């Protein structure tokens, strides 16, 4: 093998190794923030409704602070190499999207959009070849939201909030209907989408029990 070619390969390996190490620091910071968000949101299952705003106020600054490591990642990734490196932070990003979606839903009962996620994380259109909130990451975050809401539907009853499971049921059914119209070619997404049926069933059982006991008015469609 030509010594010059060997040197080029060695130089390339060295550059990638240095970049990987630099990215690891930023991704580690992002991962810590994502775990902090999950830790706080786990408390929704034991937090009375009137105390929920205080809990969400603790989550929001951490969500906002995620833009710092994301900016660091964006500055490190070479142009047009997003897809090469995205696996390093994809899991953390999906968790952050879940956190943002949960905070949005628990605040006003609505679904967060991709645009709102991008605004929160301050991702730039002109740097999408280095960092991008992909549709798949967004959808993974929403599926995690449904997983969590199915738990909340059960735990809300324990806290004496019989209306919340009904609201969750309406929201999740609407979200599931939207997912059903998507052509999910990603295997991981498709498998996780299938799991939503079990979450819906769990929520429906809670709502049925509430209705049977006449603990809250019967649910009405959001449409």
Image (cartoon, rainbow, N blue to C red):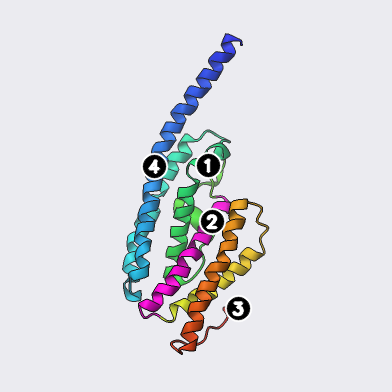
Q: Quadrant of the N terminus?
A: top right
Q: Nearer the viewer, residue 46 or 205?
A: 205
Residue 126, horizontal then vertical, whole percent: 55, 43
Q: Which residue is mark 2?
A: 140
Q: CA distance from mark 2 to mark 3?
A: 25 Å
For the residues labelled 3 and 1, say whether their Cβ atoms are less than 8 Å apart: no
Q: Nearer the viewer, residue 6 or 58?
A: 6
Q: Which residue is mark 1?
A: 86
Q: Earlier in the sequence, mark 3 or mark 4?
A: 4
Q: Would you say residue 167 is visible in this rendering?
A: yes
Q: Main secondary structure of the magenta part?
A: helix
Which range is magenta? 134-161
Foreground label between 3 and 1: 1
Residue 138 part of the magenta-drawn span: yes
The image quarter containing residue 50 is bottom left
Q: Earlier in the sequence, mark 2 or mark 1?
A: 1
Q: Which residue is mark 3?
A: 223
- Compared with 93, 155 (above or below) is below
């Amino acid at each position: 093998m030509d010594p010059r070619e060997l040197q080029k390969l060695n130089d390339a390996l060295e550059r990638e190794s240095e970049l990987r190490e630099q990215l690891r620091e930023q991704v580690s910071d992002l991962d810590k923030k994502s775990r902090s968000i999950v830790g706080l949101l786990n408390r929704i299952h034991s937090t009375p409704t009137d105390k929920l705003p205080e809990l969400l106020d603790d989550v929001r600054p951490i969500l906002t602070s995620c833009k710092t490591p994301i900016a660091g990642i964006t500055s490190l990734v070479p142009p047009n190499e997003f897809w090469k490196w995205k696996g390093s932070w994809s899991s953390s990003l999906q968790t952050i999207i879940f956190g943002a979606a949960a905070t949005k839903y628990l605040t006003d009962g609505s679904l967060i959009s991709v645009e709102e996620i991008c605004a929160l994380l301050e991702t730039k259109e002109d740097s999408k070849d280095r960092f991008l909130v992909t549709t798949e990451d967004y959808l993974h975050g929403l599926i995690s939201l449904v997983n969590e809401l199915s738990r909340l539907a059960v735990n809300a009853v324990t806290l004496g909030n019989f209306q919340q499971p009904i609201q969750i049921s309406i929201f999740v059914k609407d979200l599931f209907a939207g997912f059903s119209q998507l052509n999910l070619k990603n295997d991981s997404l498709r498998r996780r989408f299938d799991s939503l049926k079990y979450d819906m069933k769990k929520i429906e059982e809670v709502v049925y029990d509430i209705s049977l006991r006449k603990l809250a008015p019967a649910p009405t469609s959001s449409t």
